[in-house]
Image (cartoon, rainbow, N blue to C red):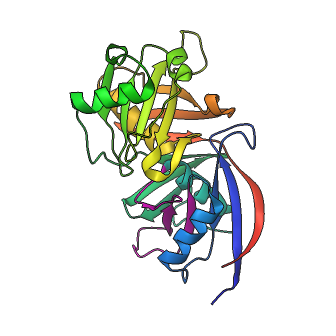
């Protein structure tokens, strides 16, 4: 039965409102079925739409279901931060002060609150290792570049299915004009370093045709898994910032911090729209 329930649209990973990545958050969604959730996510046409429910785990503060226009995800980063912000503004009180535990299909995700900044602990990778040469050749062709311009590559899948390739520079990443029609099931990141002295260590782009998204503006899950890979091989410091969304006219900024072997992914969150939705 349709009823009115709280709703928020949250901009994530930008200090400038309306220049990050928006997520639609439907609160008090315990009686909304999966078919309705998918229908709504297809209608909002955002990269992700989330639904907040009571937790099933006694350790969690709430449960989250995350949908793209084409399907449900076990985990995603910017929806995690944006939904936590919406839950807190709706009056949510964590079981432990300063620490929020989100339950989702990928398991329990820990978030922490430092003033107005929220961060999540990167979930474990479920697939790692280098990409095979056939797939790399197809990625290079889709990107319109020679295979030898890909300097490194890795499966960095923490749920959505991400792979990443590293190019020589941020400028090369920003110059990409990919045609992914031949890779409809792909979830691919492209990474390049900014010059020394830049406020951002890397530029990242995320192409997600498998999720029905040509390019995602700012991607928490991919930043999390890429940070695990880079810091694990000594290719990045314990603290750094990543720029994303530049090619789309956004101003995304993702803060990475490695503490006691754990990767934390954080950024700004702003509730831009709040009200009710008939669902």
Residue drawn at (36%, 52%) of the image: 159
Q: Does the magenta stretch include residue 246?
A: no
Q: Is residue 53 magenta?
A: yes
> In this rendering, would 215 be left or right of 44?
left
Answer whether residue 168 is visible to the viewer in this image: yes
Q: Where is residue 45 in the image (x, y as percent from the top left)?
A: 62, 57
Q: Examine the image and state in which quarter residue 190 appears.
A: top left
Image quadrant containing the C terminus: bottom right
In this view, the residue in front, 163 or 82, is 163
Residue drawn at (77%, 58%) of the image: 273
Residue drawn at (62%, 90%) of the image: 1
Answer whether residue 131 is visible to the viewer in this image: no
Q: Is residue 20 above or below residue 249?
A: below
Magenta region: which residues? 48-76
Q: Where is residue 9 in the image (x, y as percent from the top left)?
A: 70, 58
In this view, the residue in front, 168 or 70, is 70
Q: Position of residue 182 (x, y in %)?
A: 39, 39
């Amino acid at each position: 039965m349709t009823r009115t329930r709280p709703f928020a649209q949250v901009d994530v990973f930008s200090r400038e409102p309306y220049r990050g990545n928006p997520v639609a958050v439907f609160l008090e969604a315990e009686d909304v079925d999966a078919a309705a959730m998918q229908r709504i996510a297809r209608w909002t046409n955002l990269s992700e739409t989330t639904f907040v429910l009571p937790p099933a785990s006694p350790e969690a503060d709430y449960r989250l279901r995350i949908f793209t226009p084409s399907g449900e995800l076990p985990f995603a980063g910017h929806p995690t931060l944006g939904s936590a912000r919406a839950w807190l503004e709706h009056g949510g009180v964590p079981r432990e002060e300063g620490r929020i535990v989100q339950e989702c299909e990928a398991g329990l995700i820990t978030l922490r609150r430092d003033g107005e900044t929220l961060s999540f602990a990167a979930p474990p990778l479920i697939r790692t290792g280098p990409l095979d040469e056939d797939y790399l050749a197809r990625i290079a062709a889709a990107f319109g570049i020679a295979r030898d311009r890909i300097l490194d590559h890795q499966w960095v899948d923490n749920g959505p299915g991400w792979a990443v390739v590293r190019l020589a520079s941020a400028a090369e990443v920003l110059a990409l004009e990919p045609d992914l029609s031949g890779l409809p099931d792909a979830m691919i990141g492209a990474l390049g370093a900014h010059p020394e002295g830049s406020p951002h260590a890397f530029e990242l782009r995320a192409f997600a045709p498998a999720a029905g998204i040509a390019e995602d503006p700012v991607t928490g899950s991919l930043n999390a898994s890429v940070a695990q890979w880079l810091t694990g091989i000594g290719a990045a410091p314990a603290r750094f910032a990543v720029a994303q969304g530049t090619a789309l006219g956004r101003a995304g900024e993702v803060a990475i911090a490695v503490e006691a072997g754990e990767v934390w992914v954080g950024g700004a969150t702003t509730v831009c729209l709040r009200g009710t939705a008939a669902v």
